[in-house]
Amino acid sequence: EEAKEPPRIHRLDESVVNRIAAGEVIQRPVSAVKELVENSLDASSTSISVLVKDGGLKLIQVSDDGHGIRYEDLPILCERHTTSKLSKYEDLQSIKSMGFRGEALASMTYVGHVTVTTITRGQLHGYRVSYRDGVMENEPKACAAVKGTQIVIENLFYNVIARRKTLQNSADDYTKIVDLLSRFAIHHIDVSFSCRKHGAARADVHSVATPSRLNAIRSVYGLSVAQNLIKIEASDNDPSSSVFEMDGFISNSNYVTKKTTMVLFINDRLVECTALKRALEVVYVATLPKASKPFIYMSITLPPEHVDVNVHPTKREVSLLNQEVIVEKIQSVVESVLRNSNESRTFQEQT
Ligand code: ADP
Ligand code: MG
């Protein structure tokens, strides 16, 4: 058989490139919510509320009371790679903000209709402007606004037919969004969070700023969780093996459930670490066979140069320098805390 002619190679249109990239950054409604809430946190907000319609496909609205966005910056706000958080590559080593690559808002405008309303301190009115494919659809219009920023995404994936169809057929993202907000709410206890479904009378997540982590856990996950927690702490300062600080809460033997909940923040970023989760599940099975699925909230602080933050925005799995040592140390602290609590309980029951 005769060999086929090679196909010609051509350059893709920029709009095609951008839409493909956007579909990677914003994989589902919950990814958009995560990016928006992280932007609100980066803007020093003390109150963040989320409203969702049709699992996020019709509407996602995130309102905050943060520092707002300058009028002069609105024209480039939703262009790709525009950010206020990073200037030079070296900044990545010490970056404290959750965002830095200036891609989230841009991505949303390539796969949805984005409207921003914002006001900065000392201004008498705010501005509202809508974006499509990275650019403003019109000049910003003056409007009444309270403190901060509100971002609305409508008709997510209106132009990504296959994605819309899969999402419409799968269970709705609202549960995932509630789960996400619950996690943020018990870590950022100085911020009030709310998350509500459009048309619902009450919010599914409703937290008020509190100095007590246990209070926050109680108001988000309920009394049955909060009354069965043990405080844990660990740290290490041996530069040759591992340097870290950890604190958190873990469930005791009275907490019985079918599924592990592990809420993990490393350097204030919400992440997943399968190695650590597995290691702790192993300890529970061995120590508390009846309560083998734990609830765990853990916050770990590491020297910033020990964590690579520059992984793809959707990759929540982290790998840490000296991960094995850290996992082992945390595992042994959890084990001894559980053994102690078990022994003191048995002792109490005997007397
Ligand atoms: P990144 O967070 O990586 O900088 P984004 O596309 O998420 O990129 O946001 C672009 C910029 O828009 C941010 O750097 C920030 O200056 C501004 N911004 C976005 N959301 C908010 C908000 N809720 N409040 C204040 N500024 C915001
Ligand atoms: Mg961002």
Image (cartoon, grey):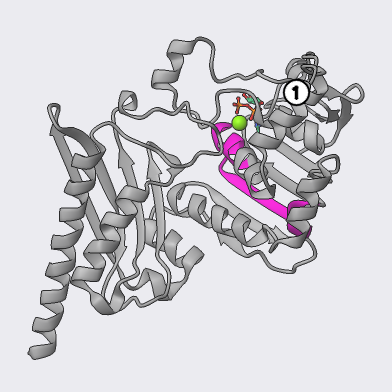
Instruction: Answer with the quarter of the image where residue 166 lies.
Output: bottom right
The answer to whether residue 93 is seen in the rendering is yes
For label 1, the crowd category at 10 Å Cα-Cα, with few meaning under 14, some 14 to 19 and many 20 or more, is few
Query: Does residue 185 appear to the left or right of 118 in the view shown?
Result: left
Residue at horizontal 88 percent and vertical 28 percent from the top = 142
Q: Specify the amino acid type for callout 1.
A: Val
Q: Nearer the viewer, residue 139 or 136?
A: 136
Q: How many marks?
A: 1
The percent coordinates of residue 332 (x first, y second) are 15, 54
The answer to whether residue 148 is seen in the rendering is no
Residue at horizontal 67 percent and vertical 39 percent from the top = 26
The percent coordinates of residue 107 (x first, y second) are 72, 31
Residue at horizontal 41 percent and vertical 54 percent from the top = 263
Query: Does residue 108 appear to the left or right of 291 in the view shown?
Result: right
Q: Which residues are magenta?
A: 37-57
On whether residue 173 falls in the magenta region, the answer is no
Residue highlighted by disc 1: 17
Q: Residue furthest right?
A: 138
